[in-house]
Amino acid sequence: MAKSAKSGNLTPAKVSQSAERPTIVKKPEDYTSEGVEDHDVFLLPGSDYQAMIVVTVLATIVRLFRIYQPSSVVFDEVHFGGFATKYIKGKFFMDVHPPLAKLLITLAGWLAGFDGEFDFKDIGKDYLEPGVPYVAMRMLPAICGILLVPTMFLTLKAAGCRTMTAVMGSCLIVFENGLLTQARLILLDSPLMIMTAFTGLAFTSFTNQHEQGPSKAFQPTWWFWLAMTGLGLGATASIKWVGLFTIAWVGSLTILQLWVLLGDVKTVTPRLFTKHLVARIFCLIVIPISFYMAMFGIHFLCLVNPGDGDGFMSSEFQATLNSKAMQDVPVDVAFGSRVSIRHHNTQGGYLHSHNLMYPTGSKQQQITLYPHKDENNLWLLENMTQPLDINGEPINGSLAWDALPSPEFIKDGDTVKLYHMTTHRRLHSHDVRPPVTEADWQSEVSAYGYEGFEGDANDYFRVEIIKKSSDGEEAKKRLRTIETKFKLVHVMTGCVLFSHKVKLPEWASEQQEVTCAKGGTLPNSVWYIEQNEHPQLGETAEKVNYKNPGFFGKFWELQKVMWHTNAGLVESHAWDSRPPSWPILRRGINFWGKDNRQIYLIGNPIVWWTSTLAVAVFVVFKGIAVLRWQRGFKDYNNTIFKRFDYEIGTMVLAWAFHYFPFYLMQRQLFLHHYFPALYFAVMALCQVYDYVTARVPGIGLRENPIFGRLGAVIFLALTIVAFAIYSPLAYGNPWTQAACKQAKLFETWDWDCNTFLTEYSQYSTQSINANADVHKTDSPLIPTNAPVAPAGDQAAQQPLMQDRAGISEAPPPAVSAPPVALPVGQSILSREEKVEYRDQDGNLLDPEQVKALEGKVSFKTRYETRTRLVDAQGNEIPQPDGAGVAPPHPDVEGVDSSTVGKPEPESQDAPVAQKEVRADESKEESIAKSDKGAAKPASEGNDATAA
C-alpha cells in the first residue's frame, strides 16, 4: 500500500510536469520572435468590431457637438482657412507646411460651395454674415479626429492587447480635451494625427506579421501592411514635416528588423535578404516620396496665378505663373539699353525709384526695391561720356546712343550711369547715412538730377561681372540679359549697390531698402538684368528668357524655401511654450475669446500625466533591466519580460522620436506640437496596463480579470470627470467664474476666468431674451458691456429698462456682460429686444419702407445696448450723452487701434526700427491685441522669414 501510495504520489507529479512542458516554448531557429501570435485586425471576433463601433459613435458625438460654435475665426483658422481662399482663386502662396491637409480642407469647402471671397483675416471675424461654409470645412478635421479613435482601438489589438484595454485607450482619445479642441477647427493637427496614427497601425500590423517568421513573409497581408506603412509615411510627411519623425521611428525599427534577418544564416539566404531589403526600399522609401511629390504636383496645378507668396521664389519659378511669364528679350546689353535690374538674393524685386523724397539725409529721391513689374523700374544705361557723331562732335541727350551705327556692348569693368526714365534722375550715392540702416559701412542711394542735367561723378558705377555666377562664356565677358550676374561699384566711394531684407517706413510704401555698402556681402550685392530693349537690337537679335525649371526644379526650390522659412520662425509668441513643459501640461494656448466664452487649448490632465508616468515607468524599468543584464541576470530569457521590453519600448521610442527633436529647434513651438508624442505615450500607457493586468503572472491580476476591468472603469471615470470639467474651454461653452477658478490648478494655466459670467442663469436668460420674438440672425454674438445707470430721484424712478437696437433682419444677440450694478432702490423689471431699420443717414424706417426696400438694398447689421431710465408713469428720464451705448466692436464697426497689427521686430541693430520683408500679407499681419492675453494666430504660418 505504501508502495501504491508512493506510486500514487508520483503520478500527479509526473502529470504536472508533463502538463507544464508545452508552456516551455523551444527557441525558434529562424528569425521568428518568441511569444508572438497572429493579431490580424481583419480577423477579430465580431464583438471587437461592435465595441469599436460603439466608441466610434461616442467619438462622433463628442467631436461634432456644437461644432458650429464659435461662428467666427479661431486662432490659426486665420492661416489655414486663408489658404483655402488662395487655392480656390489659384493665387500662389508660400507656407512652411506641405499641402495635403490644406488641399483636403479646400476640397471640403469647395464641395460645400465656398467661393474663396472670405479672407479669414482676423480672429473673431464673423462667418455667418458672408455665408462661409465653415462647418463643412471644420468637418474635415473633425472626421479625422473621429477616425483617430478606431485607429487607436485597432492598433492596440494589433499589439496584442485585450479588448477592454483597446476600449480604454480609445476612450482616452475620445475624452482628451486638447485633441478635441484641435479636431473642431480648421487646423492641420487633426489630419496630422490621423495619418500618424494610421502609420502606427500599419507598421504595428506589419511588425506582427514579420515577427511570425518566414511563413508570413511576402504573403498578401505582409505586403498590404508594409505598403500601407509607406502610404501613411507619405501622407504624414505631406501634412507637416513632423512626419519626418515618424519616418525616423519606422526607419530605425526597419533597420533593426533587417539586422535580425541578416543574423538568420540558416533560413535567410543572401538572395532572400535582398528581396526583403528591396521590398522595404520600395514600400518605405519609393511610395512615401512618390506620394509626397504627387501632393506638390497637385499644389502647383492649383496655384497657377501670382500671389502674395511668389516673392519668396526665384525669377525662374515666378516665370511659370500666369502673367508673370515674359516674352523673349534681346540677350545683349548695350549703352542706351532700357533695362530693368533685379536683385538676385532676396527676391525683393526690381531696382526702383519714384517721385518721392527721403524725409531725412540728403532728402533726394528715393531708391527702393519693388517686387512687381512697373514703369518706375525702367533705367537707361549711359556711358560716362557722350558718344561722338561722324564729325567727332558729342551727341547730347540720354537717347544719344540710339543714333550710333551699331550698338556698343557693355563689358566687364565699364563705367555706366543709370538714368531713371520716368523721373529723369540718375542713380546716385554719396557719403550720407541711409534713412533706416544708419551704419558706418552703409551709404544712402538716391536719384539725383533733372531732365537735361548731365549728372556728376557720384552717378558713376562700375560693372563688375561675377564670373562664377554667370551662365556661359560670353556672359562672363560682357553684360547679357538674365545670364550675367554683376555688381555695381560706386566709383567715387568704392561701395557696392546693396539691398537686404529691411523695409523702409510707410513714407516709402514699406518697400525694401537699397543702400551702397562698403564690403557688402556678395549675395546681397548681386544683380542681373531681366528686361532689355534697344532700338538697334531688332527682331533678328539673339533672344533669351528664363529657363523653365520644370516640376522637379520647382519642387526642390520650394522645399529649400520652406526649410529656411521654417528655421527662421524664431520670434517669440504670446502663447508659445518649450518642450520641457509639454509632458506635464504646464501651459496651453488661448485660441479665441468672445461673448464671455473662451476657447483655450489645454489637455486632459488625467490622460497627460498618466501617459507621462507610463513613459517614465518604462524608462526606469529599462534602466534596471539593462543593469541586471550587465550583471548576468537572465531576465531576457523570460518571454513575457522580453515582449514587454520590446512592445512598450517600440511605443516609447515613437514618443521619443516625436518629442526630443523639438529640443533642437529654436523656432516658435506650441503645445500642439506634442500631440503625436502624446498619442504614442497613451499607447504605451495602455500596453503597460494590459501587461500588468492580463499578462504578467504571479501578481494575481491575470488570474482575476475583474480587477483589471474595475481599474479601467475607474480610470475612465476619472478621465471623463476631468474632461467634463475642462470641456467649456474646448467647446466655447458657458462657464462661471467660480467653476473656472476652481478648475485652474496652476497659475501657468493662464486662461482668464474673468471672461466668464458669474452665474449660468445669466447665459440662459440671455439666450431666452435673444430669441424671443426676433427674426433669425445671420450675424454672430457681439459682446457688449452695459454701463451703470446714473442715480437719480429714487422716489420718482421706478424700473430700469434695457433695450437693444439693431439694423437689418438680425435679432439682437444675448447680452454677454455681467449684470448691471444698480443703485440702491432700483431694479431691472424687464428687458426689451427690438430690431430697428435705419437708412444711411440714421433715419428710422417704418415697416412699409423696409418692405419696399427688400431685394433692392443690402442691410448692414449693427448691435447696440441701451439702458433707459423710466419713472413710475413710464416717461423716459434723460441720461448723459453716450450713457447706455455699448462700445463699438472692432470687427463690426471698423478698425480699432487695439486690433492693429504690431510692426515686425527689428531685423538688426540700428537706431531706427527696421522690418523684415513681408510677402504673404494674410499671414504676415499678426493679430495683436492691446490685452496681452488676447488670442493670436501662431506665426508658424508666417512665410516672410528666411534664414
Image (cartoon, rainbow, N blue to C red):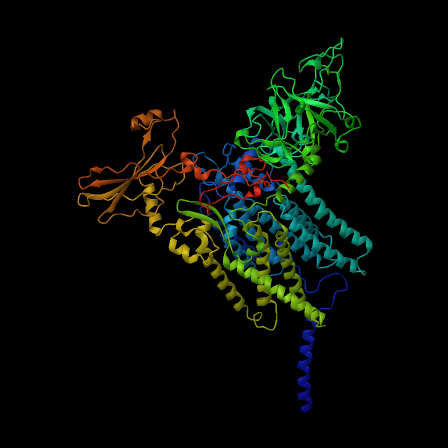
Q: Is residue 371 at all visible to an observer of this figure?
A: no
Residue positioned most to the top: 391
Residue positioned most to the right: 270
Q: As drawn, is 295 to the left or to the right of 851?
A: right
- For the residue pair 288 and 422, the one nearer the viewer reads as 422
- For the residue pair 569 and 545, the one nearer the viewer reads as 569
The residue at the point 35 percent across, 48 percent down is 763
Quarter the N terminus occupies: bottom right
**Residue 344, position in %: x, y?**
68, 32
Q: Is residue 628 at all visible to an observer of this figure?
A: yes
The image shows residue 145, relative to residue 159, as above or below, that is: above
- For the residue pair 153 and 191, the one nearer the viewer reads as 191
The residue at the point 66 percent across, 40 percent down is 559
- For the residue pair 897 and 631, the one nearer the viewer reads as 897
Quarter the C terminus occupies: top right
**Residue 491, position in %: x, y?**
70, 27
Quadrant hosting residue 524: top right
Residue positioned most to the bottom: 2
Say how many tags the image has: 0
Q: As drawn, is 58 to the left or to the right of 541?
A: left
**Residue 922, position in %: x, y?**
53, 36
**Residue 573, position in %: x, y?**
53, 46
The image shows residue 680, relative to residue 477, as above or below, that is: below
